[in-house]
């Protein structure tokens, strides 16, 4: 396999020959790794770029038109992945570790309070609204027809009825928050 050219390796790799794939990786892994590292990506980001590059090759294995130019294809793909990482990382702003203020509620307490307000508002809804919203939230695999039959409303009125129920819930939740 080591004496095969890229055309032979890719042809075998397309047919699922793991040895051929491993040989391609062996030949080009240093080249692919060098691209993100030359852009001074961290080792973790460089590893992500390499993984994305090899995934792109695996997904496009049968579409490589010029196997003799495989190295150039891999470099171009790795460069594009690197630039994507750089563009996305440039948007990130590292922050100091968050510390909860001593005087306010913790995020967990805020979430629990919001959850409590939601359930209090939900409890004020009509039985039909509670049933429609319960089925929508906890049985999303049910079709509109199945939900309509379970609740006892015509299929064509289920959507508008659910919409009205959500509007009432939002309004009552807003009233709960204002308390």
Image (cartoon, rainbow, N blue to C red):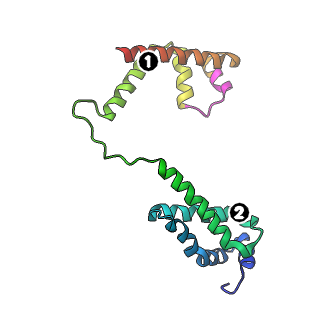
Q: Which residue is mark 1?
A: 173
The residue sitting at 73% across, 76% down in the picture is 68
Q: Is residue 140 left or right of residue 68?
A: left
Q: Quadrant of the C terminus?
A: top left
- For disc 2, the marked residue is 60
Residue at 70% from the left image edge and 18% from the top image edge: 156
Picture quarter with the N terminus? bottom right
What's drawn in magenta, residue-wise? 139-148
> Can you give x and y, in whole percent of width and height, for residue 118 in the image?
42, 22
The 10 Å Cα crowd at callout 1, few under 14, some 14 to 19, many 20 or more, is some
Residue 141: say if magenta.
yes
16 is within the stretch colored magenta = no
Residue 56 got which mark? none
Q: Residues within 10 Å of mark 2 (few under 14, many from 20)?
A: few
Q: Would you place residue 173 above or below residue 105 in this image?
A: above
Q: From the top left corner, tell me how far across and down residue 34 is, in percent.
A: 53, 71
Q: Nearer the viewer, mark 1 or mark 2?
A: 2
Viewer-closest of 109 and 25: 25
- Please tell me which residue lies in front, 3 or 123: 3
Image vertical order of residue 109 relative to residue 75, above or below: above
Q: Residue 167 appears in which quarter of the rendering?
A: top right
Q: How far apart are labels 1 and 2 at the CA level?
A: 51 Å
Contact between labelled residues 2 and 1, with CB atoms less than 8 Å apart: no
Q: Earlier in the sequence, mark 1 or mark 2?
A: 2
Query: Which type of secondary structure does the marked residue at label 2 adopt?
Result: helix
**Residue at the outermost bottom position:** 3
Please give left or right for residue 39 compared with residue 3 in the image: left
């Amino acid at each position: 396999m080591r004496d095969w050219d890229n055309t032979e390796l890719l042809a075998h790799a397309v047919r699922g020959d793991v040895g051929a794939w491993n040989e391609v990786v062996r030949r080009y892994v240093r080249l692919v790794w060098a691209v993100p590292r030359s852009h001074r990506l961290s080792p973790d980001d460089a590893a992500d770029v390499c993984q994305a590059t090899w995934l792109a090759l695996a997904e496009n294995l049968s579409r490589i038109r010029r196997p003799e130019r495989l190295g150039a294809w891999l470099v171009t793909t790795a460069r594009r992945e690197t630039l994507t990482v750089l563009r996305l990382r440039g948007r990130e702003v590292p922050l100091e570790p968050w510390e909860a203020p001593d005087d306010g509620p913790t995020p967990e307490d805020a979430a629990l309070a919001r959850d409590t307000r939601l359930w209090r508002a939900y409890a004020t809804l009509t039985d039909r609204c509670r049933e429609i919203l319960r089925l929508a939230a906890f049985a999303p695999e049910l079709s509109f027809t199945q939900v309509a039959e379970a609740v006892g409303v015509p299929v064509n009125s289920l959507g508008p009825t659910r919409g009205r129920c959500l509007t009432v819930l939002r309004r009552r939740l807003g009233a709960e928050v204002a308390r």
